[in-house]
Every structure is written in structure tokens, then in C-alpha cells.
Amino acid sequence: MIGYLRYCILCLLSFGVLAAWGQHFVLTGKVTEIKGSNVPFVSVYVGNTTQGTSSNIDGQYKLTLPAGKVELLFTAVGYEDRKVTVVLKENTILDIVLAPKIFMLNDVIIKSKTEDLANEMIKKVIAKRKIYLNEIDAFSAEVYTKAMQKLVNAPKRFFGRDVATILDLDSNRQGIIYLSETESKLDFKQRDKVKEVMVSSKIAGDNNGFSFNKASDLMVNFYNNVLFEDKLSVRGFVSPVADNAFSYYKYKFLGNSEEDGKTISKIEVIPKRGSSPTFSGVIYIVNDSWRINAVNLFVTKDNGIELIDTLTVNQQLIEIGNVYAPQSIQFSIKGKILGFKFTGYVMGVFKNYNIQPQFNKNFFTKEILKVERTSNQKEPFYWEKHRSVPLTLEEQNNYLRKDSISALKASQKYLDSVDRIKNRFNIAQILVTPYVYYRSYNKKSVTYDPLATSVFYNTIEGLALKYAVNWRQGFDDGRFYSIKPEARYGFANERFNANIKAKYLYDPIRNATISLGFGSEVANLNSLEQTNLLRNTINALFFGKNVAKFYERRFFNVEASREFAPSFELKIGVDYAKRIALSNSNFRSLRSNTNFTSNNPFTPNDENILLFPEHKALVVSGTLAYTVAQKYITRPDGRFYMESNFPRIEFNYKRGIRGVFGSSVDYDFISLEVYQKKLHFGMLGKSSILLGAGKFLITKNLNYPDWKHFRANQSMVFDPDERNFQFLDFYLFNTTKQYFEAHFQHNFGSFFLSKIPLLKKLKLEEIIGGAYLSSPEKRNYSEFYFGVKRLNFRIHYGYAYDRNVLIEKGFKFSYGFNL
């Protein structure tokens, strides 16, 4: 018995020692400068490790550490490092005061000397740029991210909606509109191989949501020649240590400071031209090794950023062995658009680096981010323990308020009350924008077409009405189905058409859908529909030109599409239709003299000759598409693709089947298209290119709707898609044989105009392009154009040639989305 008691006592003592050994405490505090101001985004390291955190925008930090003696290093851009030793026996508050780093000039140095000194240092950094760009072949790290966007002012109403109610703002129309945190495991290997797994995700007020934060977006390397290319502007921004940096920057030496036996030089970065794609601010250089230690840089709308006024980048690097890696980075933004004034930031803290990871051969795939299904199910105490950066008081209150009512917000009573406000009619919605009637609790919505696009005119139907209602039912897992009935009536030809189209997305991960439709409709003779009803109405009423030609079809079709592997999409369709050629019935216009022509484009002066006889057609089609090296994100609610920097290859096949259900068509058609949307050329902008070819293998019987149609244009107002012809007739030069087409477009992104004082303020982007077509109907047709664009508006002047003979020239204008 005594021996047993002795054994139990020893076990209890051992357990007590182990419990104490494994005990952790919370260390919190606030970092301020000598005058008492908060120091935001301070890096806090534990000992000689990469474990640590960062203070928030109010200077507050938090760490969970094991009991015992701990050494901490506090470091911030522009401040002296401070080392502190603390013995943790309980939860502890440790406030820290940092002294501004004093950068000393050894002698009285005249201005030219400071510039010479800075230039010499920058040259040494540039000389080692390529070495440092690739010195870390691979790494693994844990990354904490936080994103916050806040409205500081907003209009009372927007398109008739009460902004404060819709966005949940206070009485001053201010408030946080987005707050999100994530934790990820990030793996990286040169060149641009990334694998990220998001293990935890939190969005204020949305317990079922998944954050869109990506740790890989925070991997900014200033050793690259160009940063943020085609993100904040077309061309991106020149790094202060780029190979050609001296063409864009001046530098000023601000002094040296000693830090752990190293000399850190502070250098001011000054753009030579205010409107150039450059940064302003300071960078910190480690002497002798000539590395970047930290950056505090910003760009403004004068430098070419779009949609925001200012972007500030603060990056702190940490020494790991004999290399440097990012420890923390913050992007801060502010701006104003359409009366909404906003601020915000995105920050990331990298910790627990492994710079010599071992990856299996097939470890990296095109899946750059996977969001775990349980990542949004972490309890509040989990975040209290794992959150790397403390919340500010405003962020705490935002979480408390939004999370406390999150259950209420999911209730039918609350959602119905919100819907009653969102569902209110107003004149803008009825006339200009679609009206959407929400039933949020049941994930239902009904969208009604606006009247502005429902009333139109053409020479076939005269004044006409077309109205559609789209009913949509969603599900928690991302699936949905929609049903869209549509009715159309022409007052001149007194013909009524109606149809119903339905779509079901049954597998969001594989983008698998099935669609069907039946009824009757008035369709454009060019199946690519390169002019909409509004543009055609304007052409007819104001310019006296009936550009669009139509026919009627009574149809039934079904289509299925699915990805059988990432970036591989297979689409199969069957269409059965009775096709009826139409003729003009109304020639009215607001002009006294018109240039109206027959609805048969091949007999413009004869209304009595129909383009094709009435017939039935059964057509099966298939499309196999693959985007080379396309990266994607996998979330529980679907797979989301990133825009690829490589071509999309598309193979198409169509077969007209004779003798089934009275079908009279009999043909085979194949085509291959290679489309590269973005081809980057650094400071010279970006290009897009398309090459396409096709051939009818069998042409025993086919009618005009079966021909190969091209993306054409005959209007002054045009569709800005870079794959379109700008002057080609919609109908005359479509083919029943073989063809080859090529399109090229380049956006210089203000490369030239930003250097002209009177024009640079307009921030216009220069556009050039061309197209080529060869077919039996139109051999050696070519186009060339040049112009400018700003946001979604564009104007250019072009020329069209037929076998080197100029056949047309003129201005074109667009107001849509384009390159």
C-alpha cells in the first residue's frame, strides 16, 4: 500500500510538472512612440525565430507564449529596434515605447552629395537584384491575413436605394462594410508555383461565408522590375530598384542607422515625373549586402492607378539564416468614386518559415488555393487564441454587433424585413435598371427587365415590345436553377413570339450545367448578334439604317456542359427549329431620307426575295475548350478560375442531321480557335491575339443560319471586344466553305500620352489593332485602327482594305467593357 501511494504521489507530481511545463499565457500590450502616438504594424518576433505577430493599426499586439523566460524583438519601419526579456507566470500586459530611428549624416553633406551617395547605393542593389529575386528557391509558411474596408462618407441614395440601410451604415453614413480574417498554410517554389490551404476563415456578420483573402496576393517582391502589372493599371509600376530605375527615379540619401551590427541606410525615392508609373516614399537598404530591409512606398491616381486615389505599401523583411523574407506587409487604400468615400487595408503576417521544404514531384498543381469546408466553423475562442493581430476597438465592435445579430439576420423575419426595403419600386429601377424582387430566406429572386431595353424599333416589327422575367432559386451549396419566360410582339407585322429558357447548375465545383428552351423567338441572322436592339433602334430612327436583319425560329433545344478536369470544358448541344424568313413591314424613321434595305442582305433593293425557304433543322454541336496553365481556387461553393496568361484553345464541331423530325439540313463543320487575352510587355502595355480557322467538310444542304458567321460591325457605336472586326459587313461575307481569321490589339496604357503635359491629366490609354480575314467570299480583307480609351469608354479611327484597296474608313465609339 505504501509503495502504491508513493507511486501515485510521483505520478501526480510528474503530472503537475508537465502541466506547468506545457502551460501558456497571453502577452498583450500597446506600442507607442515617445510622444505617446500609436505605432501601427509593428513586427514582434519571439527570440531568434520567425514566430511572431504584428500590432494592429492602433499599435496593439497579442501573443500566446509558453510559461517562462521569453525574449522579444519589436521592430518597425522608421523606429529603433527594441529587445525585451519577459518572464511569463501569468497573463501579462507589456506596453512598449519605441524611439524614432535617427539616421545620421556623418558630415555636413550638400544636396548633390546625398544624391550621389543614394545613387551609388541603389546601383549596388540593382547589381544584385536578380540574385535576391530568386535566392529563396522554396519556402513554407503560415500566413494570417486581415482585410477591412470602411465607408467614411456615402450618398443618401444610389439608384433610388437607401444606401445606409442597404450597407448597414450609421446615421452619418459611415461604417465598416467588410471585415475578414484568415489563416493559411502557404507553400511556394520558383517559378510562381503556389499552393495555399485556408484552414480558418471569418467574415463579420456572415458565419457561413468564406473569405476571398489570398495569402499569395500579399507576396510582393520589389526585386521585380514591374509590380502590380495589369492590377492597378495596365502597365504596372516600376520598382525603385528595377534595372531601368534611373530612367524613372531620383534618390536622396537620408542617413544611416545601426541595427544589430548592421548599417541600415534610409533612401528617399522621388519620381522624375509626377505622372509616371512610379512609387514615392522611402526604402531601407542593408549596407554591405545591399539588400532591401523594408519599404514604405505609395502611388496615387496621378501615377495611373484606377478606382482608388492612393495605395500605400509597408513591407518589413526578416532575416532567416543568410536570406531575407517578408515578415509583414500592409496595403492601405483610400479613394472616392460615385460619391462613396472609402478607406481600408489588407495586411498579412508570415510566420514559422521553412526555407528548405521538401515537396513531392506532383505537390504543386494549378489549384493555387483550397478553402477547407470547415474553415468558417471556428468558434470565437479559437480566434481569440490564434489571431495574430489584435482587433481594433472599431473592429471588435463591428464583430460584436454583426455576429450578435448573425443568427437574427439568418432568420426569416429579419430577411423579410430587409427584403421589404430592397424590394421597393423606384422610377430608376423600372426605367433603366432591372428590378429584382428578393426572397432571401428561401434564396429566391425574380428579376424584371427594365423598360429602356424592352421597347425598341426595327423595320421587321416596327415598334415592338420584348419583356422577360427571370426566376432564380439558389441553394446553400452553390447550386441554383433559373427559369426565364420571354414574350415579344411587333406592332407592324402583328407577330407574337414567346419562349421559356431554363438552366440548372447542379455541380458548382465542376461548373456542370444543363439548359433547355422551347418556344419561338425573333433571332438575328448573324448568330453572334453583334448589334443589340438599342443600338439598332438608334441606327434606324436617327440614322435611317436598318443594320440588323432578322428571322423567326420555333425551337426546342437542350445543352449540357461540364468540366471533366480543371480547365477542360466539354459542351454538347442539340437544337431543333423551324426557321421562317421575314421581310420588312415598316419603314418609318425620324429622318426624311433613309437608307433602309431589304431584310435579305444579298438583295438589298428587292423586298420580295426571301433569304431562305421555310424549313426545319436538327443540329447537334460540341465544344471542347482548354485554357493552358489556368490557375484556380477551390471553395466549398465552387471552383473559381483566375484569368490566365496563356492561350485558350477551343475546338468546335457542328452537324446538321437530315431526315429526323423533318430536318432538311445536312452538313459538317469544324473549327479551331486560339485566343490569348493578355500578353504582357511590361511598361509597353499588354496585347491580345486571336487566331481562328474552320471548314465545312460536308455541304449537302444548309441554309443561311447554318453558315459560319463572323464578329462583324457596321455601326459607329461598336462592341469593343478585341475579337471583333470593326468594319466588316454583318451578313455578306459569312462563309459556307473555309476561312482563316486573325485579330490583334494592343493597349499601351498611357505610355506616350502620359508624357504630354496637356493630356496626361486625362489618363487616356493608347489603343492600336488590326484584323485579317481570308475566305472564298472575302479574300485578304484587313483592318487597322488606332485610338484612345478611358475606363469603359473608347474612340478610335480605322481603315478597312480589300486586297490592298481602301474600302472604308472612319471613327468608331464604344461604351462597353474591353481590353
Image (cartoon, helix red, strand yellow):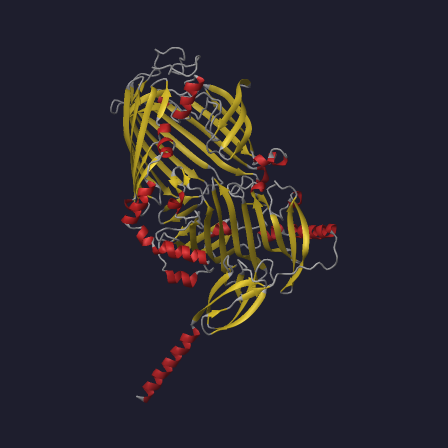
Quarter of the image for residue 14 reads bottom left
Viewed as shown, does residue 220 lie left or right of 380?
right
The percent position of residue 443, horizontal first and vertical second, equals 30, 44
Q: Considering depth in this image, is 282 or 5 the residue closer to the camera?
A: 282
Please say if 791 is above or below 376. Answer: above
Tell me if I can see residue 376 in this picture: no
Residue at figure coordinates x 36%, y 60% from the top left:
379
Q: Whole-percent x and y of residue 422?
A: 34, 41
**Above or below for 288 versus 702:** below
Which residue sits furthest left? 661
> As rendered, which of 348 and 301 lies closer to the eye?
301
Q: Quadrant of the N terminus?
A: bottom left
- Judging depth in this view, the residue of 670 and 610 nearest the camera is 610
Residue 221 horizontal/vertical position (percent): 56, 51
Query: Position of 531 compared to 617: left or right?
Result: right
Q: Is residue 209 above or below residue 743?
A: below
Q: Quadrant of residue 561?
A: top left
In front: 130, or 427?
Answer: 427
Residue at 39% x, 28% y: name it. Answer: 670
Question: Can the viewer see residue 779 in this picture?
Answer: yes
